[in-house]
Image: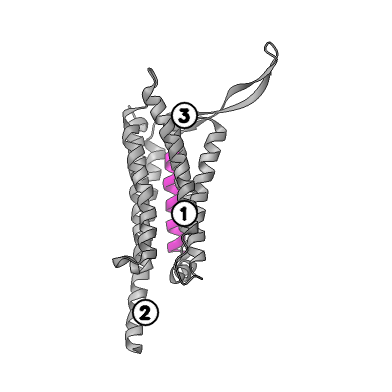
Amino acid sequence: MKKKEVNMNQNFEIKLKGLRNFNTIMGFLHLIQGVFMIIVSNDTTYPIYTNFLKFDIANRALVPDPKLWYELPFGIGTAVFLLLSATAHFYLSTIGYKRYVENLRKGQNPVRFYEYALSSSLMIVLIGMLVGIWDLGSIILMFGINAMMNLFGIMMEYHNQYTKKTNWTAFIYGSIAGLIPWIIIVIYFLSAINSSGAKPPAFVYAIIPTIFVFFNIFAINMVLQYKKVGKWKEYIFGEKVYIILSLLAKTALAWMIFAGTLAPV
């Protein structure tokens, strides 16, 4: 029995070392793409407006007062979500490695979800801007509620360390939160399609279903982890799947945006 436990521990340590190297490689893959987006992308920007109220003296009523607040450089925005992932991967494989291992043994990785809370929320904002969500308040709300979806992921992993049976409350609430930005995006997308002169660019038709599917596969990966299906019985396997999904989703969005609007003419 002791020999079996020793072998299991040795096997786990080998997998941890492989995961450390895997994080380093993924960090460089994200870093290279992020730097590329900064250097090569054109200067395309999308506007962000405020719609504060003003008093219309003629009509004696409060009316919206749209004003340009900021022009967001899309190349920089695209690079940032790639560089956020690169930073997280390098942290986990270097100065944060000891804590990373401790958390993996407990069946959690909060750093993953903190990074997703920033990077995937920026991704959802960029997708929203592509379909015409340019209001500052709407952008902040979309970013915030998508970030909350990921923070629910931390609660899911933390809470279930102390339960005999998996408690899905955090997963359910997180899924609801994560769905709301997509509902808004689809409403704006369908409205743009039905518009006579403001149809979205062709590449947006590919971005929305592709990234929506990727986002949902993350949730499926978590379900498989907690249901302990096949290789997902080992938490480390699910962790590796998260890493791969993150690279694929960010790479897909970055290059679809680059091909559609950022490539130099």
Q: Earlier in the sequence, mark 3 or mark 1?
A: 3
The number of numbered badges drawn on the structure is 3
Q: Nearer the viewer, residue 135 or 25?
A: 135
* Of 122 and 184, the residue lying toward us: 184
Residue 73 pos. (x, y %): 47, 33
Residue annotated with mark 1: 172
Q: How is the image coloured?
A: one colour
User: What whole-number distance in Å separates the C-alpha atoms at marks 1 and 2?
Assistant: 34 Å
Is 154 positioned to the left or the right of 23 in the image? right
Q: Secondary structure at mark 2?
A: helix
Of mark 3 and mark 2, the one earlier in the sequence is: 2
Q: Amino acid at mark 1?
A: Ile
Quadrant where the C terminus lies?
Answer: top left
Tell whether label 2 touches label 1 (CB within 8 Å).
no
Q: Amino acid at mark 3?
A: Tyr
Of the image marks 1 and 2, the number of the one nearer the N terminus? 2
Please state the horizontal and vertical placement of residue 55, each as a whole percent of the image. Answer: 69, 19
- Work out whether 28 lies above or below 59: below
Which residue appears at 37% of the width and 49% of the height?
A: 216
